[in-house]
Image (cartoon, rainbow, N blue to C red):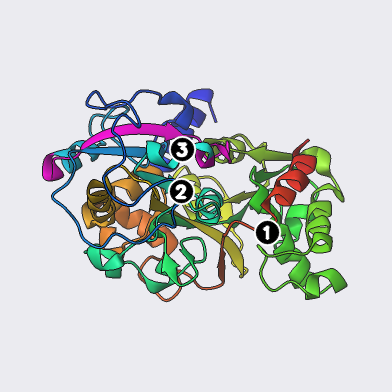
Amino acid sequence: MTVAAVGLLAAACAGRPSPATKVATPGTSAAAGEAGPSPSSRSSGATPTPLASLGRGEGTLSVVAIDGYAEWGGVDPKVKWVGTFEKATGCKVSLRYYDPRAQERPGDFPPQSFDVISATPEVGGRLMDEGKAAPLNTGLLHGYDEIPKRLRTLPSVTRGGRVYGVPYVWSTNEILYDTGKVSPDGPESLFTDKGPVMFRDRPLTLADAALVLKAQGTDVGEGIKDPFDLTDAQLDAAADLFTSDGDDQRTFWRDPVEVVQGFATGSVWLAQATPYHLDVLRRGHKPVRALTDRPVTGWADSWMVSAQAPHPSCAYKWLDFTMSPDVQRRVSSWMGLAPANPKGCTGAARRICADYRVGTAQAFRGVYFAVRPKAYDKWVERWSRVVS
């Protein structure tokens, strides 16, 4: 395959450029945190409570988003939905992006400096733990019941019987392999097969190793019930799998494009990837398949409201807007991730929804969805050893 062809195939991954290419913000943005706190009881240190009712909107909304989750046409003029929200609600958006790969930074944002944030399980867990996320009054969210109960009740968005996050997009971690190079026996092949292997560079990838330990039925594996809730011994054993054999041929990806490039050039034989990766590679006529073994791990990213949101009414309007079928269709087709609302499976998102079996009984079968581990700092430390 030529370099040009590899580039075109890689650009198709997630239907978007690399996140590093986008740095601008909408021309309508105000400075983040410019507005002061609303005259409610959202003072620093107070126990956050769900919003009782909505006002007409404060006219401004501060959004902190993962790159690609709130588009205003800055990368592709045809890919935009922030402006639609502003026109429909009168809430002018101040938009900042953050890189979820810098995993702890969003937790450092002062809660009065933003209204809503798109949160990974790691970031959302920290916000809930530190009281920086507001519990939600789901009765004020008109599209909330359209999201499957499995996603609405995930531990990554709920705590103590309260809801803190509205699921936005989700995915699963699949094992892809080049049929011309390897014939894996199962998930353990990621750690035992000879040949170049690629893992997602994320501490929670240790949970995938924990699932292998669980399947092997070893003494340490037999005690694993939830791969995101491990004892120190189980965590150590999971980390050891990455360095037990052939680690010199293991690489770690951060940008989804790296997976496509690896299989397209033949430099990767096995990889931890997503169903959309498989679809892109098949459309590129690459001999790549996915293991059908279950269980697997997955994750759901959500929108959360700051416990000290300066503009709570506009924040709720944003949650409603992002749950709408139109936005769900747009973000799914732009990011190559499954929409939380199955009604978003129209137009360009149909193929992606088929990849993830959205709306079927098979969609969530055998999936352990990620949650921030209680001992997350230990996961980060163990993972740093793996990738060093």
Tell me: 386 left or right of 292: right
Q: Which residues are magenta?
A: 87-107
Q: Are marks 3 and 1 in contact (CB under 8 Å)?
A: no
Q: Residue 153: x percent and y percent?
A: 44, 70
- The amino acid type found where label 2 is placed reads Ala
N-terminal label among 2 and 3? 3
Q: Quadrant of residue 335?
A: top left
User: Which numbered dot is residue 119?
Assistant: 2
Residue 156 part of the magenta segment: no
Tell me which residue sits at (35%, 30%) in the image.
32
Query: Callout 1: 10 Å neighbours few (<14), some, many (20+)?
Result: many
Q: Secondary structure at mark 2?
A: strand
Residue 103, compared with residue 20, is above or below; it is below
N-terminal label among 1 and 2? 2
How many marks can you see? 3
Q: Secondary structure at mark 3?
A: loop
Tell me: 81 left or right of 117: left
N-terminal label among 3 and 1? 3
The residue labelled by disc 3 is: 110
Front-lying residue, 363 or 133 = 133
Tell me which residue sits at (36%, 70%) in the image.
148
Residue 180, compared with residue 354, is above or below; it is above
The residue labelled by disc 1 is: 208
Query: Callout 3: 10 Å neighbours few (<14), some, many (20+)?
Result: few
Q: Are marks 1 and 2 in contact (CB under 8 Å)?
A: no
Q: Residue 26: x percent and y percent?
A: 27, 27
Tell me: 38 left or right of 83: right
User: Which numbered dot is residue 103?
Assistant: none
Residue 171, compared with residue 292, is above or below; it is above
